[in-house]
Amino acid sequence: MRMAIVVFAALMTLGLVTFGVVVAQKATDSVPLKTAEAGVSSSQNTVAAAEAENAPLHLTEETKAAAPFVPTVVAQNNKAVVAPANPAPTLAPKSVAACNNPDALGLSRVIEIDTTGGPAFGTEHFKQYDFLRDKEVALTFDDGPWPGNTPIVLKALQDNCTKATFFEIGEHATWRPDLAKALATAGMTIGSHTWSHKDLAKNPYAKDVEQAKQEIEMGVSAVHMAVGGPTAPFFRFPDLQQPRDAMAYLGARNIAIFSTDIDTFDFKMRRPEDVVKSAMTKLAKNGKGILLMHDFQHATAEAMPELLHQLKAGGYKIVHMVPKEPVTTLAEYDDMVRARDKYSISNNARSESSIIKTISE
């Protein structure tokens, strides 16, 4: 009799455990896949479908760029569970964040620019809008992003809890979209600097506004694609050459034009100390200004920690420029940028680290 009771109890326990496993599995299966709050892209649908079908998940670089987040696949009970990783870049924040480093240069204020009608800034060429107060500086960089240099500039800015505006060459951005995204994710403002740094005041662009438009718009589209999120309707002409027809076109597109107050001419310098001297000497004379530098230049990248240190020591305050609204790209030029990469999209979808490995040195 005692043996029968023991067997019966064991069977009951086994049944309850089995029931609990089934209930838990059903509860797990009923949890919906979370998506971004606003809208679901085609790449999100791809992720959801792969998860729902228990299929292997593979995203090409093209799909990742279109998605509002890059999914991380985690193995759990032999099912593919998709969890969002870092969110996609957004426009630069419109507030001054707290800084825990008392020795950092920091950020003094953020100004929002309404780009309706294409207003132009920088007293070297445009005198109407002089928005900086005495001892205020707006840091700007051209010609990036560039490996080996842009990351050094970004680190110096982050170490000092401060922000800058980057006018990127579209072609450079397509070569290293990871650098463009890193800047945007860090809260920098990202504008454009044409597709391939052509002087639009020279022919054929000067006599053919359609070619000038293509150079401008492909740059806007390429930078926007590289960032993988909203970018600013901010534009700087290569060599600060600003033909009237191209300026009128940017005005119609509601894209603001930036010249400069202080050109450091850092592209002529090979030593970091010369870059620092140029910037500080011209600032002392001018008292304030939109400062033009190039994250394309290695000397400038190496100069940044000392330059930011001297700006703080000199009592200068950093102002960050952000747009009221993001730029809107044009589909025609988006397609042109995509066409430039038609030979590499399918074959170069894998990461470099998964293809190339050092096996002996």
Image: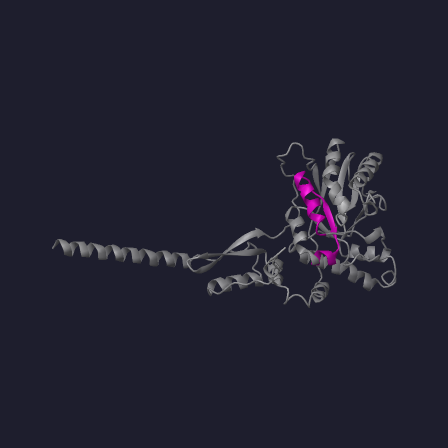
- 18 vs 345, left or right, is left
Frontmost residue, 157 versus 207:
157
Q: Residue at x 44, y 60 (%)?
A: 79
The x and y percentages for residue 122 are: 81, 45
Q: Is residue 170 magenta?
A: yes
The x and y percentages for residue 206 are: 87, 60
Residue 340 in which image quadrant: bottom right
Q: Does 287 appear above or below 153?
A: above
Do we see residue 113 in this rendering? Answer: no
Residue 129 in which image quadrant: top right
Q: Residue at x 65, y 65 (%)?
A: 345
In the picture, the quarter occupied by the C terminus is bottom right
What span is in magenta? 145-174
- 327 vs 19, left or right, is right
Q: Does 304 appear above or below 21?
A: above
Q: Residue furthest front?
A: 361
The colouring scheme, among rainbow, by chain, secondary structure or one colour, is: one colour
| Picture mark count | 0
The x and y percentages for residue 251 are: 79, 54
Q: Residue furthest left?
A: 1
Do we see residue 109 in this rendering? Answer: yes
Q: Is residue 133 magenta?
A: no
Q: Residue at x 80, y 56 (%)?
A: 197
In the picture, the quarter occupied by the N terminus is bottom left
Q: Residue at x 41, y 58 (%)?
A: 77
The x and y percentages for residue 293 are: 78, 45
Frontmost residue, 328 versus 265:
265
